[in-house]
Image (spheres, rainbow, N blue to C red):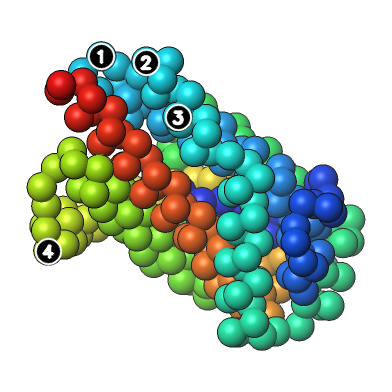
Amino acid sequence: MFQRHFFASCVALGISATGLWAEDRPTDAILDLLSLPQTIEVMRKEGLSYGAELGADMLMSGPNSGWSATVERIYDTERMEETVRAGVAAAWEEGQGDLETLTAFFADDAGQRVVQLEISARDAMSETGIEEAARLAWRVEADKPEDEQDPRLELIAEFVESNDLIEANVVGAMNSSYAFYLGLVEGGAFEMTEEDILREVWSTEAENREDTREWLFGYMMMSYRPLEVEALAAYVDMAKSEDGRALNRALFAGFDRMYSDISYALGLALAQQMTAQDL
C-alpha cells in the first residue's frame, strides 16, 4: 500500500469521482473512500517539480515555457485518475477479495484518521527539508536499543514485510525507469538497445532499494507518530489480512500503470525537446 514514487496506501476521504468515468467499477467506491482525487493532486505536485528538475538536468536551455507546458499536460489529473481506476479494477478482478470488509474499515472515523495522516505526511515530504528530517528521525529511532524504540516502529516493520512494500516499490520504480528510457530512445534522443536499457535500469537497483527503505520508514514514522499504538495495530492487522494484501497489490498495479505511462510520455517529450535544440 505504500509506494514511494507512487502514493502511500489506502488513503482518505475526498472528492467523489461520480460522472467522470464511463462505467461503475466494483473498486470505484473504495477508491473514493481512499480519496484518490486528493492523492492524484499530490502526485501532480510532485510530478511538476520532477519535470522541472528533468528540464534543468537534460535540456541545454533549461526548463523553458514550452517544456513546462508539456509537463503540465502530461500530469493531467483526470487521465491519471482514470488510469489508476482502470488498473486497480483489473487487478482486483484477477485477485478477488472482500471489498465490504475493507470499505467498512476505511469508512470508519479511525480509518479516515489514518489515511488523512498519510496524505498530510506525503504532501509535507514533497519539501526537501521535511523529507530529510523524516529520514533522520527514522535513523535515530532505529539506532536505539529495541526496548527503547517507539512501539510503532515494530508495527511498521510488520506492515512493510507482510506486504513486501520495499520490493513492490523497487519493481515499480524500475518499470517506470524502463518506460522513461524507452521514450527517450523512441523519441530519438539516444540509441540504446533493449539490453542497454535493462542494463542501465538494473545498475541502480541496489541504491534504489536502500533509498526506498529509508524513505518508506521515514514517511511511515512521520505519518503514524500522532496515531495511538492501538489504532496503528488495528490498521496493520487489516493490511496484513488476505483482503488487505489483495487491495495493496491492486493499488500497486494501478499506480504502476499510471507511472509507466507518465514516464514514457516524459521520455518521449524530453527527446523531442532535446532533438529540437540540436537543430
Query: Which amino acid type is marked by label 2?
Result: Asn
Where residue 270 appears, as percent x and y from the top left, is 30, 34
* Disc 2 to disc 1, C-alpha distance: 7 Å
* Disc 4 to disc 1, C-alpha distance: 31 Å
Task: Tell whether 50 sits left or right of 273.
Answer: right
Q: Quadrant of the N terminus?
A: bottom right
Residue at the image point whose x is 79% and y is 56% from the top: 32
Instruction: Answer whether labels 2 and 1 touch (C-beta < 8 Å).
Output: yes
Q: Is residue 179 above or below residue 154?
A: above
For mark 1, what is the residue? 61
Instruction: Answer whether labels 4 and 1 touch (C-beta < 8 Å).
Output: no
Determine whether the residue tagged by mark 2 lies in a helix, strand or loop. loop
The front one of 150 and 176 is 176
Task: Tell whether 188 sits left or right of 246.
Answer: left
Residue 101 visible (yes or no) = yes
Task: Tell whether 232 sits left or right of 112.
Answer: left
Whichever of labels 2 and 3 marks the residue nearer the N terminus, that label is 2
Query: Which amino acid type is marked by label 3?
Result: Thr
Residue at the image point whose x is 51% and y is 55% from the top: 258
Whichever of labels 2 and 4 marks the residue nearer the N terminus, that label is 2
Query: Which amino acid type is marked by label 1?
Result: Ser
Viewer-side label of 3, 1: 3
The front one of 65 and 166 is 65
* Disc 2 to disc 3, C-alpha distance: 10 Å
Q: Is residue 169 above or below residue 279?
A: below
Task: Tell whether 276 sits left or right of 43.
Answer: left
Viewer-side label of 2, 4: 2
For mark 2, what is the residue? 64
For mark 3, what is the residue? 70
Q: Residues within 10 Å of mark 3 (few under 14, many from 20)?
A: some
Query: Which amino acid type is marked by label 4?
Result: Glu
For mark 4, what is the residue? 195
